[in-house]
Amino acid sequence: MRSVLLATALATAPLAAHAQEAIMFDYDGSYEDAAFAVENAIVNRGLVIDYVSHVGEMLNRTGADVGSTAALFDNAQVFLFCSAAVSRRVMEADPMNIVHCPYGIFVAERDGAVMIGHRDYPDGAMQEVEALLDAIILEATAE
């Protein structure tokens, strides 16, 4: 099931904020299975995962350091990768689409619920990237 989440992130200027939408899919299975399925779906397309960001571990490890006791995720990772073909097309349409690269798919677990998703990209050429990410996630959630 695809849903849109509106998350507010602080901008670099004090007290300034902007909204970022995320496209999310529910995953009917374990977090470990979801992460494995996403990794496989990316690699199955001949794409190389450049980096896996262990966001959940970092947040859990640093919470006390920043004065927080809130547990945000049980588990959370972001898989970062690029597609040479898709990136070339979207950046030929607008070289400033470089700001969206690399592309990321997150897998997160909160209170036992597992979700897979990605950021919502702007209309225009970046919809090709969004379609690629949706296809990867749909493959992962179909396993």
Image (spheres, rainbow, N blue to C red):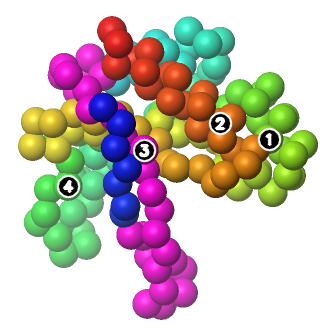
Q: Earlier in the sequence, mark 4 or mark 2?
A: 4
Query: What residue is disc 4 on?
Result: 72
Which mark is in front, 4 or 2?
2
First-in-chain label (2 vs 3): 3
Separation (CA) of disc 4 from disc 2:
28 Å
The amino acid sitting under disc 3 is: Ile
Q: Which residues are magenta?
A: 8-34
For discs 4 and 1, the disc positioned in front in the rendered view? 1
> Residue at the spot x=33%, y=9% of the render?
143
Residues at discs 2 and 1 in contact (Cβ within 8 Å):
yes
Res 50 seen here: no
Is residue 25 rendered to the left or right of residue 40? left
On the image, numbered disc 1 is attached to which residue?
90
Instruction: Residue type at mark 4: give it.
Output: Leu
Residue located 20% across and 22% down the image: 28
User: Which residue is disc 3 drawn over?
Assistant: 23
Could you tell which of marks 3 and 4 lies nearer the N-terminus? 3
Q: Quadrant of the N terminus?
A: top left
